[in-house]
């Protein structure tokens, strides 16, 4: 068998430990094995590599020229291996929740506070990613907040609440003097819609009585179009909570169906904290009802 295929991390760990402790005896204690096992492992490594790695006298242990090179490389490989293990296991100590626009809306801060209080050992990361699954399909998050349709064949999901819709408009728009707007009035205006991840479609209006539309692909472009006064946008209340901007005002749309808010996750690979997140967010929406 080719010698390189026999090389194992335990061989490298043994070499590093012998050099760092200064003796076979101390290395054996550090590694929790017998002194004879340390000697056998080092000998096996030297046979695999075909070089002598240590000068051994009755009093000292010093690396050979080849040993110095192997030792440096061994330290890098062991560090890389530890990093690999750390990344593979932090899934249980970190929860990444993706969202496209507005995270959990007005509940975002309270969710973060309660999560930290209840689950201090599971670090929470909120990640904005403007794709239909808010980064879940791309492997960027463990759960995603969605306000659009869910592919139930690919993803498990839980309905956590509903949000009323509101109209986003320029802050100097005459409609800002009103307390609320009706859907049928909006058809007189030009509506800006995020075709990729937005919650608004023309199905809110009857066919033949729909507003003119401009399309964008990002929340920042959407807000910029509205701020000019050229367009208005219909959006869940979460957007109003998350994007308070100069030049933008929000007013309730009083006769539109509310937007369902769901958490989705990979059906066959759920994060251990999934149901804790679902329960906490559902509680927050329930308290707000």
Image (tube, rainbow, N blue to C red):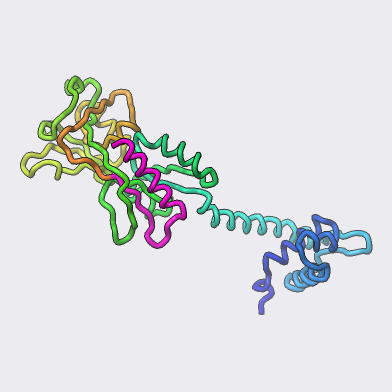
Asked whether residue 90 appears in the rendered view, the answer is yes
Q: Where is residue 222 in the image (x, y as percent from the top left)?
A: 27, 35
* Residue at x 73%, y 56% (from the top left corner): 72
Viewer-nearest residue: 251 or 100:
251
The percent coordinates of residue 261 (x first, y second) are 29, 45
- The answer to whether any part of residue 221 appears in the image is no
Percent position of residue 161, x then y? 29, 43
Q: In which quarter of the image is the N terminus?
A: bottom right
Q: Which of 141 and 247 is in front in this view?
A: 141
Question: In the rendered image of this protein, does residue 216 appear above or below residue 240?
Answer: below
Closer to the camera in the image, 189 or 141: 141
The image shows residue 26, relative to residue 170, as above or below, that is: below
Specify whether 243 is left or right of 61. Answer: left
Q: Residue at x 38, y 54 (%)?
A: 265
Q: Residue at x 41, y 52 (%)?
A: 275
- Which residues are the magenta region? 261-289
From the viewer's perspective, is residue 68 above or below residue 227? below
Residue farthest toward the bottom in the current orientation of the protein = 1
User: In front: 239, or 15?
Assistant: 239
Seen in the image, is 67 located left or right of residue 237?
right
């Amino acid at each position: 068998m080719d010698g390189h295929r026999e090389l194992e991390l335990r061989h490298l760990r043994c070499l590093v430990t012998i050099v760092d402790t200064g003796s076979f005896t101390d290395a054996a204690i550090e590694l929790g094995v017998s002194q004879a096992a340390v000697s056998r492992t080092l000998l096996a490594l030297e046979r695999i590599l075909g070089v002598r790695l240590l000068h051994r006298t009755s009093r000292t242990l010093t690396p050979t020229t080849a040993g110095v090179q192997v030792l440096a490389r061994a330290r890098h490989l062991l560090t890389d291996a530890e990093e690999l293990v750390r990344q593979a296991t932090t899934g249980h100590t970190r929860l990444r929740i993706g969202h496209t626009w507005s995270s959990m809306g007005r509940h975002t801060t309270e969710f973060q506070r309660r999560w930290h209080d209840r689950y201090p050992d599971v670090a929470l990361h909120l990640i904005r990613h403007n794709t239909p699954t808010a980064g879940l399909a791309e492997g960027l998050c463990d759960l995603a907040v969605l306000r659009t349709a869910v592919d139930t064949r690919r993803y498990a999901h839980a309905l956590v609440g509903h949000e009323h819709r509101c109209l986003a408009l320029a802050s100097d728009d005459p409609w800002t003097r009103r307390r609320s707007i009706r859907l049928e009035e909006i058809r007189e205006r030009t509506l800006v819609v995020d075709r990729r991840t937005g919650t608004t479609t023309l199905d809110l209006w009857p066919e033949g009585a729909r507003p003119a539309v401009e399309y964008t692909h990002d929340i920042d472009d959407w807000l910029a179009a509205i701020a000019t006064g050229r367009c208005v946008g219909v959006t869940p209340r979460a957007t109003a909570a998350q994007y308070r901007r100069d030049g933008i005002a929000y007013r309730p749309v009083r006769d539109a169906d509310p937007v369902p808010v769901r958490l989705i996750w990979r059906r066959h690979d759920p994060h251990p904290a999934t149901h804790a997140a679902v329960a906490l967010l559902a509680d927050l929406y329930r308290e707000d009802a």
